[in-house]
Amino acid sequence: MPGSRTGRPPVQRAVRRPAASRSRRDNPLRRLYTRAQRAWDRPLTAYYLILGGSLLVIVLGLVMVYSASQITALQMSLPGSFFFRKQFLAACIGGVLLLVASRMPVKLHRALAYPILAGAVFMMALVQVPGIGMSVNGNQNWISLGGSFQIQPSEFGKLALVLWGADLMARKQEKRLLTQWKHMLVPLVPVSFLLLGLIMLGGDMGTAIILTAILFGLLWLAGAPTRLFAGVLSIAGVLGVILIKTSPNRMARLACIGATEPKTGVADCWQAVHGIYALASGGLFGSGLGASVEKWGQLPEAHTDFIFAVTGEELGLAGTLSVLALFAALGYAGIRVAGCTEDPFVRYAAGGVTTWITAQAVINIGAVLGLLPIAGVPLPLFSYGGSALLPTMFAIGLLIAFARDEPAARAALAMRQPRFGRKRGAGGPRGPRRWNTMRRRAPAARPSGER
């Protein structure tokens, strides 16, 4: 290389990059998008979404149950916090179930599938026994436990169908039997129809719709051909039409779709219309927590089936969109867990739980918005009702266990360094320990003579 006149080597100048590339790289929106995409693709994203999203829904639900149920409790000559205390007790018990389910191995979940199914069928049959079963709002689907405590066995039927159906389809897939239509349908569809029949004996069509959605979700995950899927859907649709046509109450609920004012006659649409009134009066940020007007006797079931309407009135559009975003996050995380696993049982169980929670949320919110008929199903993890909360929290524990069990998630959890308390190192009373971090693992893989 030729030198300069002074004898020094020429100065190497950096090549200027085009201004367009620098502006594209320095764009703050693009940097924010890149960071969000990296965080979204991390192996523990599904785990944190399920854990954080479910806890936020439960806590917000407890707040709204307390706000929406005070007037109803006072009208019944009960303390204002009566329903809240029962819901809080159910949430504490459900928290224990969630923790146990999240720590149980997959083999134990599969072992519990048949006992849970047998117990659910027994309790659902026990509902129809005179003197044991009791009727609430015209549905014979409850068992009294003494005092003000009741249990609805059909809610546990959802969990039973998910676990048992996932174990059944997983065993058949391992034996390569799902290519035959008879193995895909039998005994999944007959057992599902048995559960549906026991539920419909009590007149609870809303829960029957959720069980049907779980059945379709399992068949879809199993790769059912279009003709088979359409055949089962057609049979379910015909049975649904017959059940609706033969019930004046269900026909009246169907006639209230899109109603904006109460009607006279059988279809008065009082509940549907006042749910719309509650949402419409909420505005952008609502009237304030506890300041709902519709819960003062105008809106029936304000703390159960129509708690979303009270949420819209008190927290406004911002509150309702937050609830929708939390359920969307749960749905995405469940789909991600089902799609990233190699275990067929985990895939079917995660898909079944995601179908259950998503379908029930869509049916409840759609009814409040006037887009679907009122089916009488609660908003999962949000509405008042311990019978619905306990199996749903156990199902959330299933998703957490499956999200933790992914290979990438296990490796990420194993490499995390404890942030609080004393670090696990040498000098402890139990002898030396190696930190479970990547920094401590790296030197162990080097040759013994290398430093």
Image (spheres, grey):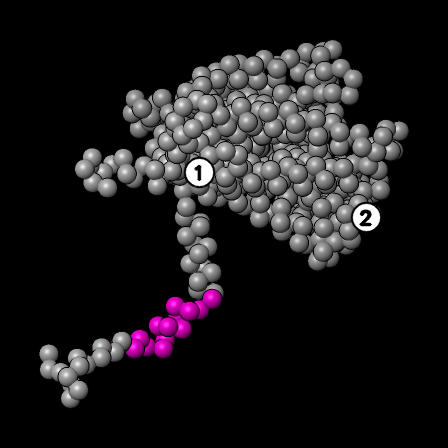
Quadrant of the image for the N terminus? bottom left
The residue closer to the viewer here, 448 or 160, is: 448
Magenta residue span: 15-28
Q: How many marks?
A: 2
Q: Which residue is mark 2?
A: 291
Question: Residue 424 magenta-drawn?
Answer: no
For badge 1, the amino acid type reads Gln
SS under mark 2? loop
The residue located at (72%, 56%) in the rendering is: 285
Please rate how many residues cluster around mark 2, counting C-alpha atoms within 10 Å: few if below 14, some from 14 to 19, many from 20.
some
Question: x and y percent of residue 13 in the render?
Answer: 25, 78
Question: x and y percent of residue 385 in the render?
Answer: 69, 29
Tell me: 328 left or right of 255: left
Question: Residue 26 magenta-drawn?
Answer: yes
Residue 199 found in image quarter: top right
**Which is nearer the N-term, disc 2 or disc 1?**
2
Compared with 131, 265 (above or below) is: below
Asked whether the viewer can see residue 305, the reply is no
Residue 64 found in image quarter: top right
The residue located at (44%, 31%) in the rendering is: 424
SS under mark 1? loop
Q: Which residue is mark 1?
A: 417
For badge 2, the amino acid type reads Ala
Tell me: 53 left or right of 282: left
Front position among marks 2 and 1: 1
The residue closer to the viewer here, 61 or 408, is: 408
Compared with 377, 257 (above or below) is: below
Question: x and y percent of residue 332 in the render?
Answer: 48, 44
Please rate how many residues cluster around mark 1, counting C-alpha atoms within 10 Å: few if below 14, some from 14 to 19, many from 20.
few
